[in-house]
Image: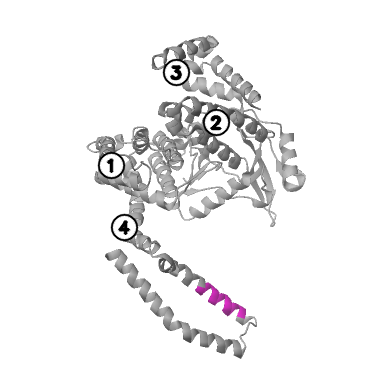
C-alpha cells in the first residue's frame, strides 16, 4: 500500500516538475541542500511552461493529474494558513477542466440509482451542459401530476471517481505524515488533520442526498430574504449519485457585460452578494462556502440564485458571538477587548500575553481608521487576523478559515460588479442586526437563561412551549369535532391534577422571571 502511494506521489511530482510548478518557489528562501535539489528537479521542466504564470502552471499540473488533484487544489484554496495567501489566491481561480463522460454512462447511473429506466423517469434527457471533477449536469424535463412539463437539471456523479479519490487520499495521508515527522514547525498546522478535513469534505460532496439537504435548509433559511434564493429539489428523482433540481435560467455573474446590457444595477447586485452571504453566515450560521461567479446566477428580475452546495460552512452560536464581539471591537477601536475575546474563545493559548496580543491586533485595526471605506477590505482584515496565528501559537480554527476564504471570494465577486464597493457601509445593516442580537439586551437575557440550569432552559423554551400548547389545543378541538370526547372520569381526574399544579406552576414561572431579571440587570 505504502509503495503504491509512493509511486503515485512520484508521478505527481514528475507532472508538477514538467509543468513548471517547482519554478514558482523562490530559491533564495531555501537552505543550500534544498536549493540544489530544486535546481535538479527544474531540469525536467518543459520549455513552454516557463512562459506561463504561476497560477496557470499549477492549474495545468493539477488538471493533468486528474479530478482528485483538482479537488485538492480547490480545497487548499480554503487554507491560506497552510499554503500561503498568494498561493491560496491563485488556487481560488482553479476551475475544473475535465471532459464530460458519455451520456450513456450517465443514463446507466440514473437507472441504477433510481431503479427505473431513464425514459420512465424523465420525458427528455439531454447531453451534458457542464462537467466538473466530481459530477456533470444534464438538462431534462419531467411531467408533473397536472400534466405540466417542467425543465430540471440532473447532476450525476462521475463513474469511478469515488475509488480514484480513495486511492489518492492514501498518498495525501502519506505525505502529510512525512511532513509532520520531518518538519516540526508544520505540526501546528496539523497536515494530517487537513487531509482528514479534505477526506470528509469529499465524502460529503459525493453524496448528493446531503447536497439536496443543504439546498433544502438554505431554501428554508432564505425564504423571506430579498433578492436571493436557491433551486428547489426534486426529491423523488434524487439519490446518492443523482441530484435532480430546478433548472435555473439567467446569466452567470461572470458575464458582467451581459448583466449590464440587460439593464441591471451592478452596484446593487454587488451589495446583494455581500449582504446575502453575511445573512447566511452570521444570522443562520450556515453558508455556501463556494460562492464564486460560476455558482451564482442572476434572473431577469434581479434575483440572485446560488447553485452547487457541495461545500458549505457552519458557525455555532458561540462562534458567531465571538466574531460579533471581535468585529464590534474593531469598529470601536477597543483592541484590548478584541484580544480578550480571542483568549475567551480559546483561539489563543492561555500562556500568551493578552497585552502583547492586543498590540498585534492594534497593528491590524489602526490602518482601517482614517482611510476611505472603499479602500478597506473586510476579507483582508480577516486574512491579517489569521496571519498572527503563528506568532502567538494559535491552533488552526477550520471553521473560521472557511469563513475567511469564502469572504475573500465573495468580496472579489462583488468588486467585479462594483470596483468602488464600500464593504463597511454595505455590510452595516446586516452586521448591526447581528451585533444587536448577539451583544444587546436580548442576547444577555438568553445568556442569563442558559446560565440558570434547568430553570433557565425552561424559561428560554417558554415561547416554544406556548406555541406547541396552542397547536395541541387546536388539534384537540379539531379531533373533538370529529367525535373525540373525554369521559366523565378522565375529565374529573384532569381537573384534580390542574388544581394541584396550577399554583406551583405560577410560582415557578414568577421565580424564573425574577432570577432572569436579577441576572440581566444585576
Question: On the image, which quarter does residue 208 sit in?
Answer: top right
Using the numbered discs, state the Cα–Cα distance from disc 4 to disc 2 in whole angstroms. 42 Å
Can residue 89 be seen here?
Answer: no
Crowding near pointer 2: few (<14 within 10 Å), some, many (20+)?
A: many
Question: On the image, which quarter does residue 509 sit in?
Answer: bottom left
Residue 376 placement (x, y as % from top left): 31, 36
Q: Are marks 1 and 4 in contact (CB under 8 Å)?
A: no
Using the numbered discs, state the Cα–Cα distance from disc 2 to disc 1 in whole angstroms. 36 Å
Q: Residue at x 58, y 78 (%)?
A: 476
Residue carrying label 1: 354
Using the numbered discs, state the Cα–Cα distance from disc 1 to disc 3 in whole angstroms. 36 Å
Labels 2 and 1: the sequence-earlier one: 2
Residue carrying label 4: 440
Labels 4 and 3: the sequence-earlier one: 3
Q: Main secondary structure of the magenta part?
A: helix
Crowding near pointer 4: few (<14 within 10 Å), some, many (20+)?
A: few
Q: Residue at x 40, y 76 (%)?
A: 508
Can residue 293 be seen here?
Answer: yes
On screen, residue 458 above or below 7: below
The scheme the figure's colours follow is one colour
The tag on residue 25 is 3
Labels 2 and 3: the sequence-earlier one: 3
Q: Are marks 4 and 3 in contact (CB under 8 Å)?
A: no
Viewer-nearest of labels 4 and 3?
Answer: 3
Crowding near pointer 3: few (<14 within 10 Å), some, many (20+)?
A: few
On screen, residue 33 above or below 424: above
Q: Give, as a single range, the part of the protein colored magenta.
A: 469-479
Amino acid at each position: 500500500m505504502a509503495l503504491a502511494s509512493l509511486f503515485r506521489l512520484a508521478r505527481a511530482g514528475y507532472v508538477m516538475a514538467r509543468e513548471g510548478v517547482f519554478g514558482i518557489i523562490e530559491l533564495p528562501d531555501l537552505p543550500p541542500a534544498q536549493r540544489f535539489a530544486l535546481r535538479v528537479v527544474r531540469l525536467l521542466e518543459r520549455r513552454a511552461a516557463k512562459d506561463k504564470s504561476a497560477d496557470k502552471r499549477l492549474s495545468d499540473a493539477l488538471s493533468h493529474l486528474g479530478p482528485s488533484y483538482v479537488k485538492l487544489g480547490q480545497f487548499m484554496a480554503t487554507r491560506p494558513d497552510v499554503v500561503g495567501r498568494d498561493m491560496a489566491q491563485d488556487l481560488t481561480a482553479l476551475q475544473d477542466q475535465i471532459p464530460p463522460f458519455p451520456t450513456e454512462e450517465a443514463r446507466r447511473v440514473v437507472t441504477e440509482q433510481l431503479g427505473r429506466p431513464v425514459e420512465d423517469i424523465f420525458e427528455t434527457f439531454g447531453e451534458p451542459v457542464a462537467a466538473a471533477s466530481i459530477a456533470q449536469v444534464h438538462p431534462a424535463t419531467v411531467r408533473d401530476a397536472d400534466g405540466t412539463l417542467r425543465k430540471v437539471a440532473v447532476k450525476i456523479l462521475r463513474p469511478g471517481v469515488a475509488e480514484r479519490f480513495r486511492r489518492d487520499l492514501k498518498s495525501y495521508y502519506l505525505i502529510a505524515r512525512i511532513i509532520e515527522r520531518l518538519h516540526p514547525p508544520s505540526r501546528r498546522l496539523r497536515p494530517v488533520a487537513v487531509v482528514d478535513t479534505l477526506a470528509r469534505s469529499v465524502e460529503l460532496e459525493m453524496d448528493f442526498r446531503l447536497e439536496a439537504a443543504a439546498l433544502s435548509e438554505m431554501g428554508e433559511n432564505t425564504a423571506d430574504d430579498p433578492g436571493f434564493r436557491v433551486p428547489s429539489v426534486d426529491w423523488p428523482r434524487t439519490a446518492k449519485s443523482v441530484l435532480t433540481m430546478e433548472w435555473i435560467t439567467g446569466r452567470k455573474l461572470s458575464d458582467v457585460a451581459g448583466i449590464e446590457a440587460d439593464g441591471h444595477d451592478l452596484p446593487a447586485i454587488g451589495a446583494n452578494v455581500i449582504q446575502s452571504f453575511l445573512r447566511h453566515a452570521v444570522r443562520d450560521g450556515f453558508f455556501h462556502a463556494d460562492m464564486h461567479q460560476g455558482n451564482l446566477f442572476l434572473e431577469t428580475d434581479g434575483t440572485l440564485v446560488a447553485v452547487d452546495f457541495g461545500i458549505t460552512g457552519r458557525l455555532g452560536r458561540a462562534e458567531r458571538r465571538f466574531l460579533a464581539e471581535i468585529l464590534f471591537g474593531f469598529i470601536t477601536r477597543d483592541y484590548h477587548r478584541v484580544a480578550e475575546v480571542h483568549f475567551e474563545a480559546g483561539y489563543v493559548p492561555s500562556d500568551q500575553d493578552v497585552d502583547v496580543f492586543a498590540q498585534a491586533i492594534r497593528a491590524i485595526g489602526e490602518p482601517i481608521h482614517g482611510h476611505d471605506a472603499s479602500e478597506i477590505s473586510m476579507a483582508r482584515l480577516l486574512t491579517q487576523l489569521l496571519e498572527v496565528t503563528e506568532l502567538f501559537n494559535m491552533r488552526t480554527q477550520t471553521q473560521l478559515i472557511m469563513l475567511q476564504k469564502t469572504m475573500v471570494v465573495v468580496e472579489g465577486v462583488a468588486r467585479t460588479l462594483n470596483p468602488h464597493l464600500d464593504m463597511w457601509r454595505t455590510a452595516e445593516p446586516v452586521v448591526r442586526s447581528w451585533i444587536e442580537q448577539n451583544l444587546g439586551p436580548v442576547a444577555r437575557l438568553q445568556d442569563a437563561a442558559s446560565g440558570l440550569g434547568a430553570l433557565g432552559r425552561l424559561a428560554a423554551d417558554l415561547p416554544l412551549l406556548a406555541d406547541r400548547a396552542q397547536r395541541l389545543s387546536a388539534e384537540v378541538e379539531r379531533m373533538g369535532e370529529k367525535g373525540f370526547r373525554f369521559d366523565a372520569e378522565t375529565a374529573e381526574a384532569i381537573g384534580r391534577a390542574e388544581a394541584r399544579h396550577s399554583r406551583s406552576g405560577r410560582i415557578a414561572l414568577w421565580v424564573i422571571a425574577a432570577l432572569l431579571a436579577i441576572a440581566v440587570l444585576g
